[in-house]
Structure formats: structure tokens, C-alpha cells
Image (cartoon, rainbow, N blue to C red):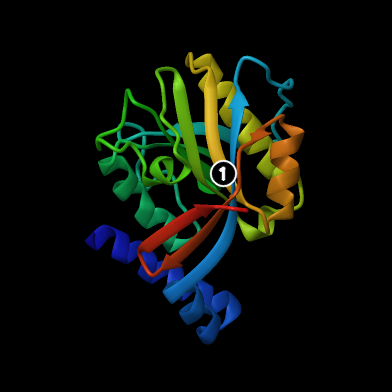
């Protein structure tokens, strides 16, 4: 719980810096969103493109991660790493000059350290089978957006997981996030029934959209 509160604290400061104090308070205390769960067949993937010069795709694990070698520009992203490792999650990141310019995380039955695997799965009523993964918390730095990095990161992650023997990947995005909608459709994701999510600080509720 303490680790999660630290993440929320730094998220609040970052939101305050970007959008103002009142906006940060409102977002932290209450948030409503339409969520779009999605699933992707990893045996059918579009071809990979070559990365930009200086851009490296890596897997972030407890064995490979070091704060001295991989820097996260946002403190809240850095704080998540150890929290996620404790739960058995693994990260996939695009790194340039030692900085993670984009990253996302995943969990599956083989690596999870908690019985529920991830709280999103209960909300979406997804029961992960063997060789299936749940991908979540994708982030691309604000200065990197609009140049196709999100598509390249997600495509690289799907190919990486397929190479590891996984056959299906679940995830979700916000219906308000139009770039995320087009990235997922471009990569051939299938949409599942939408949900209306309400968050009161750390407490969440969800219901199927009518």
C-alpha cells in the first residue's frame, strides 16, 4: 500500500505541474472513464519495422533493471518499477541514451505473484489461460508522441511476446484516447464490451456500458 501511495503522490505532483493544482486534485479524488478492453491474436501480426537510430527495445526484469542504467523521466514511472516487480509483472521499454522514452507492462500466470494476477482482469471478467498475457500501463513521453513511437512500441511488444510462445494478449485503452484507438485498430486488436469505470481515490467500480 505504501508503494502505491508513493506512486499516487508523484502522479499528483506531475499532474499539478502539467494541468494545475485544481485539475490534479479532481483527477486524484475522482475520475470517470469509458474503458475499451481489447484482445489480440499473437499468431497474426503485421511485419516489424526497423527502429530509429539510437532506439533500443528491452525487457525490464528484476535481473536486468538498474536505476543507474535505465532512467524514467517521470518519477511516478520510476516508482512503479519496484512495485510491479513485487507483483511479478514484467516491463517492455524503448530506451534512448539510457532513458525510457516509452514503456508498458505485462503479466501472465507463469510469472504473477498474486492470486488475482492483476485487478483489471476481475473488472473485465478476463480469465487468462496458459500462453495468454495481459498488457497494461502503456506510457510514451509527451515529447515523443505523434511520431509513431507508440505504434512501434506496442508492435515490438507483441512480436516479443509471440517469440516467447504467447498466443493471445489482452489489454485496454480509454475511449477518450483517440491515438490509442487508432494504434490498437492498426495492429488488429478486437474490441470487447466497453465498461464505465469510476474511481474514488484508490477504490474502483465498473459496469458494462449500455
Q: Quadrant of residue 106?
A: top left
Quarter of image, res 94: top right
The reply, left or right, for residue 72 in relation to residue 35 is: left
Q: Name above or below for residue 35 compared with residue 75.
A: above
From where the camera sits, is residue 95 visible?
no
The residue labelled by disc 1 is: 172
Residue 138 pos. (x, y %): 54, 46
Q: Pinpoint residue 84: horizontal percent, then vertical percent.
A: 34, 45
Task: Kindly indicate the quadrant of the structure image that contains residue 183.
Answer: top right
Total marks placed: 1
Q: Position of residue 152 (x, y in %)?
A: 68, 36
Tell me: residue 118, above or below residue 187: below
Residue nearest the viewer, comparing 173 with 98:
173
Q: Is residue 144 visible?
A: yes
Horizontal side, residue 61 vs residue 54: left or right: left
Tell me which residue sits at (36%, 39%) in the image.
Answer: 65
Taking 83 as reference, is 23 above or below it? below
Nearer the observer, 100 or 47: 47
- Foreground residue among 163 and 169: 169
93 to 13, vertically: above or below: above
Q: Residue furthest front?
A: 210
Q: Which quarter of the rendered picture does the N terminus lie within?
A: bottom left
Check disc 1 and report its element: helix, strand or loop: strand
Residue 22 lies left or right of residue 199; in this view the side is right
Give how far across and how far down residue 187 sits, in percent. Answer: 71, 31
Please name the residue shown 53% across and 15% down the image. 163
Amino acid at each position: 500500500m505504501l508503494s502505491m501511495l508513493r506512486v499516487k503522490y508523484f502522479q499528483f505532483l506531475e499532474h499539478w505541474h502539467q494541468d494545475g493544482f485544481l485539475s490534479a486534485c479532481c483527477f486524484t479524488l475522482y475520475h470517470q472513464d469509458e474503458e475499451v478492453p481489447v484482445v489480440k491474436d499473437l499468431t497474426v501480426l503485421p511485419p516489424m519495422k526497423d527502429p530509429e537510430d539510437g532506439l533500443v527495445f528491452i525487457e525490464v526484469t528484476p535481473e536486468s533493471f538498474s536505476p543507474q542504467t535505465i532512467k524514467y523521466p517521470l518519477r511516478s514511472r520510476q516508482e512503479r518499477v519496484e512495485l510491479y516487480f513485487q507483483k511479478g509483472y514484467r516491463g517492455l521499454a524503448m530506451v534512448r541514451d539510457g532513458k525510457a522514452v516509452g514503456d508498458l507492462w505485462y503479466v501472465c500466470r507463469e510469472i504473477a505473484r498474486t492470486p488475482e494476477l492483476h485487478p483489471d482482469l476481475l473488472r473485465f471478467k478476463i480469465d487468462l489461460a496458459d500462453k495468454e498475457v495481459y498488457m497494461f500501463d502503456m506510457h510514451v513521453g509527451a515529447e515523443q508522441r505523434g511520431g509513431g513511437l507508440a505504434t512501434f512500441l506496442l508492435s515490438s511488444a507483441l512480436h516479443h511476446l509471440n517469440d516467447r510462445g504467447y498466443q493471445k494478449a489482452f489489454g485496454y485503452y480509454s475511449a477518450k484516447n483517440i491515438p490509442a484507438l487508432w494504434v490498437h485498430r492498426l495492429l488488429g486488436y478486437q474490441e470487447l464490451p466497453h465498461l464505465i469505470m469510476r474511481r474514488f481515490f484508490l477504490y474502483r467500480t465498473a459496469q458494462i456500458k449500455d
